[in-house]
Amino acid sequence: MALKITAKQKQTLLENDQEYYLDHRPVVKIFNPAGAATWLLTSMDPHGVAYGLCDLGMGSPELGSVSVHELAEVKGPLGIGLEVDRFFTADKTISQYAAAARASGSIAA
């Protein structure tokens, strides 16, 4: 099952990868509807390796890389996969989200 990342979001993720050194705003929020895991992604290379803020719901969110293809394969305890938050619009840069997440122990977006 594929995550429903729009063509525009994918284009922005790929463009941001060309300027990976900038402090971008997250483009996509992916979450587990049956759990606490959340990912805020800012960029992605052509192979589907994305960069962003990853929070597995264990109190220690961190910046890092994740495979979008692997996220698309995740099935939670209810047998449903991860979802893209269609209504998410970033109001901070990824470093600002990371600082807030480290302070609180989770992503609040």
Image: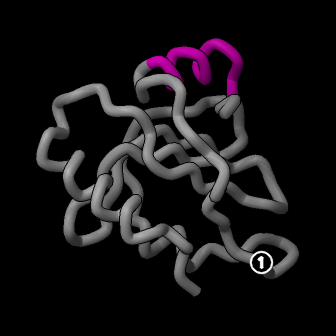
Rendering coords of residue 15 (x, y %): 20, 52
Q: Measured along the vertical axis of the image, is residue 13 above or below residue 61?
A: below
Q: Identify the image quadrant of the C terminus.
A: top right
Whole-percent x, y for residue 23 in the image: 29, 26
State the residue in front, 71 or 22: 22
Total numbered labels:
1
Q: Residue furthest bottom?
A: 1
Q: Is residue 37 left or right of residue 94?
A: right
Q: Quadrant of residue 84?
A: bottom right
The residue under label 1 is: 80
Percent x, y for residue 19?
14, 39
Q: Between residue 61 and residue 26, name the one nearer to us.
A: 26
* Magenta stretch bounds: 96-106
Q: Quadrant of residue 80?
A: bottom right
Assign the magenta stretch its main secondary structure: helix
**SS label for mark 1:** loop
Name the residue at 68% across, 50% down: 37
17 vs 23, left or right, is left
- Residue 40 versus residue 99 in the image, above or below: below
Q: Residue at x 37, y 63 (%)?
A: 8
Rendered location of residue 65, percent (x, y): 36, 49
Q: Residue at x 63, y 13 (%)?
A: 103
Left-right relation of 8 to 33: left
Question: Which residue lies most toward the left here?
Answer: 18
For the N terminus, the image quarter is bottom right
Given the image, on which type of amino acid does mark 1 rest? Ile
**81 versus 106 height, above or below:** below
Q: Is residue 100 in the magenta section?
A: yes
The colour scheme used to paint the residues is one colour
